[in-house]
Image (spheres, rainbow, N blue to C red):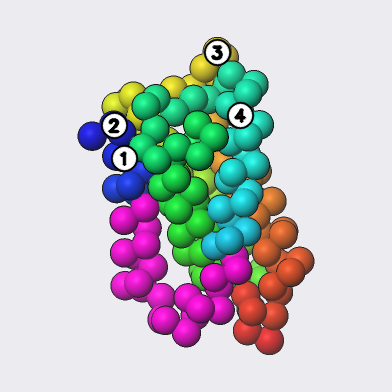
Amino acid sequence: MQRYLNLLYSIIVWSAIFIFIKPKRIKELLPVALIAAIVIAVQEAFLIPLDLHIFNNPFLPIGNVPFFHLVFGAGSGLFMMNYMKKEPSRKALILLLFAIVITFMAYISNLIACCNLLGKFTIVHNFYQNYLVLCFLTIISEAFLYKRLYRQ
């Protein structure tokens, strides 16, 4: 199971997307999914060489990162940005909620040895890193796709 956990997470997030988001909106937000996949790939490109995080026996690896981890990241970014609001307080709440959910999923991944946090990099550090990555994704998405995100 540990090898296929990212596949399971991808299936869950993309199923939620197809259930809760209208097809037209999914099409509008596909660039966000691409940006999210790139952001998560860059994040992993920093964490893995620094020996802070590693995937154990990845399924379909791309540079030691499971392909479906990137697919999960793309879907998560699309799902989050679909619910993003303009107001800063609501934006912070949505970012916090998604960071908590993603950190919980990372915690499960660590429990079943799909991946490991190395050295002094703990689940608390992982939460901060997830929150900052989601903030960065939001800033980049708004910079390039503001009108699509907020339908102006």
Give the CA separation, mark 2 to mark 4: 20 Å
In x, y percent, where is residue 14?
Answer: 37, 62
Placement of 119 over or under 85, stated as above or below: above
Which of the labelled discs sits on residue 47, or is there none?
Answer: 4
Query: Which label's residue is closer to the chain start, 2 or 4?
Result: 2
Which of the labelled discs sits on residue 119, or is there none?
Answer: 3
The amino acid type of the residue labelled 3 equals Gly
Question: In the rendered structure, which segment of residues is drawn in magenta?
Answer: 10-32
Which of the labelled discs sits on residue 2, or is there none?
Answer: 2
Instruction: Determine the secondary structure under disc 3.
Output: loop
Indicate the quadrant where residue 50 lies.
Answer: top right
Q: Residue at x 49, y 25 (%)?
A: 54
The quadrant of the picture occupied by the C terminus is bottom right
Placement of 10 over or under 125, stated as above or below: below
- Pointer 1 and pointer 4: residues touching (CB < 8 Å)? no
Placement of 25 over or under 50, stated as above or below: below
In x, y percent, where is residue 127?
Answer: 54, 36
Residue 22 falls inside the magenta stretch:
yes
In x, y percent, where is residue 6?
Answer: 36, 43
Q: Name, please, the residue furthest toward the right.
A: 143
Q: Residue at x 54, y 70 (%)?
A: 30
Q: Which residue is mark 1?
A: 5
Q: Residue at x 63, y 34 (%)?
A: 45
The amino acid type of the residue labelled 1 equals Leu
Give the CA separation, mark 1 to mark 2: 5 Å
Indicate the quadrant where residue 87 lies.
Answer: bottom right
Q: How many marks?
A: 4
The amino acid type of the residue labelled 4 equals Leu
Q: Is residue 102 visible?
A: yes
